[in-house]
Image (spheres, grey):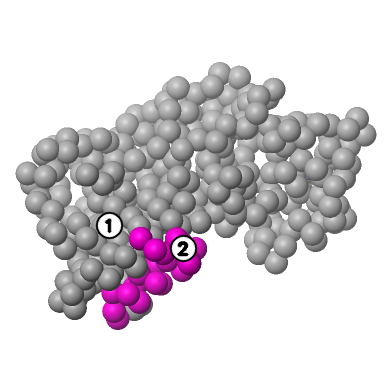
Amino acid sequence: MMLALHILGAAKGIVPDGTGSRCVVCGASPFAALRLAGKLLGPNFSDYDALRDPGATHACAGCCAVLGGKPSKTDPPIRMLQVVAVPGEPLRVVARADFEAYLRRPIEGPHVLVWNDSMKKHASLRAGISTGDELRIGGDAGMVVYRPAEDLPLLDAVKELRGGFARRDIASGEYPPKKIAAFGRSRWQRLEGVVAARRPSYLLDFLIGTLAAPEVDATNTEDDMPISDTDRTAAALVRAVANNAKVNVQWGVFHSGIARKRLIQAAASRNTLPDVVEKFAQYLDCTGLGMRDAVAILETLTADEETDILAALRARPAMIATLAAERPE
Ligand SMILES: [Zn+2]
């Protein structure tokens, strides 16, 4: 039986050896045994429930290519990426912002879609084989089943709500009244009606997590809320760290919300700005030379400016992370 894992293995360039093997990950594999099971499934492996043959001694070459690999800028492992695999084609790495297109205009024939969120689990293990009528996307917490014919209205509703509300508002159904007023009550009611019918579900969580807010008119935002020098400098610091992080912005650090989450954690756990920056850098694996830009900014600040920036990072981390994700002027 052809599995999503086998399509992914082939997309990584692994070729069936004609004999196949018994594989701890995928069970009956078309690929040769390559490594001892324990060598592939190291101490950090946490997806034991997804193994198809837990008693097997070896992992096949395909599963080693799909699950293995160390964090790297040039050849990051699949668990750090969003990927699409089509039989007969090399693996496509998809930017987080571009994944939506595969939901709106699905590939017709069999293919495999993988959305890694935490980068600690192997979403590949939970992918099924998708077709144009039914997408069976591998996610961190399970398989997301998305049927465009039925689910496109939900996608559109979440997308539109993202223009006025935070992800947690939509996920919880608890919307701040002020934001409802700004968004428009009847528009909100109509969209929330579509969402409420599907809450809670993994598909809804997935769409909330994957869909970026619609593009906003930059001039409008600036009119609404002038950005202070403090916030600009805070954003420059955040950008300096994230741009030089091993877990690079290229792999969607900002858009995945990792930068925002880590920034909130760092600001809450440290008491001075340099310590917050250092902690944030540790979280993103940005050290040594990569820290140069951030240190250069820190060196220009007075004690009062440091205090103001620290306060801003604690009060408006999401806004500052968003600002940092935009291109500097
Ligand atoms: Zn295998």
Residue located at (55% from left, 36% from top): 93
Compared with 144, 104 (above or below) is above
Say left or right for 284 vs 222: right
Residue located at (58% from left, 45% from top): 74
Furthest toward the left, the residue is 223
Label 2: which residue?
A: 289
Residue 63, label in figure: none
Which of the marked residues, 2 or 1, is nearer the chain's N terminus?
1
Indicate the amino acid at tag 2: Leu
Q: Nearer the viewer, mark 2 or mark 1?
A: 2
Indicate the amino acid at tag 1: Ala
Q: Quick one: SS at disc 1?
A: helix
Q: Quadrant of residue 308?
A: bottom left
The front one of 100 and 75 is: 75
Label 1: which residue?
A: 236
Say left or right for 282 vs 7: left
**Residue 172 among those drawn in magenta:** no
The front one of 63 and 71 is: 71
Q: Quick one: SS at disc 2?
A: helix
Residue 125 is situated, as x and y percent measured from the top left of the image, at: 66, 46
Compute the Cα span from label 2 to label 1.
17 Å
Compared with 213, 315 (above or below) is below
Residue 143 in view of the camera: no
The residues colored magenta run: 271-293
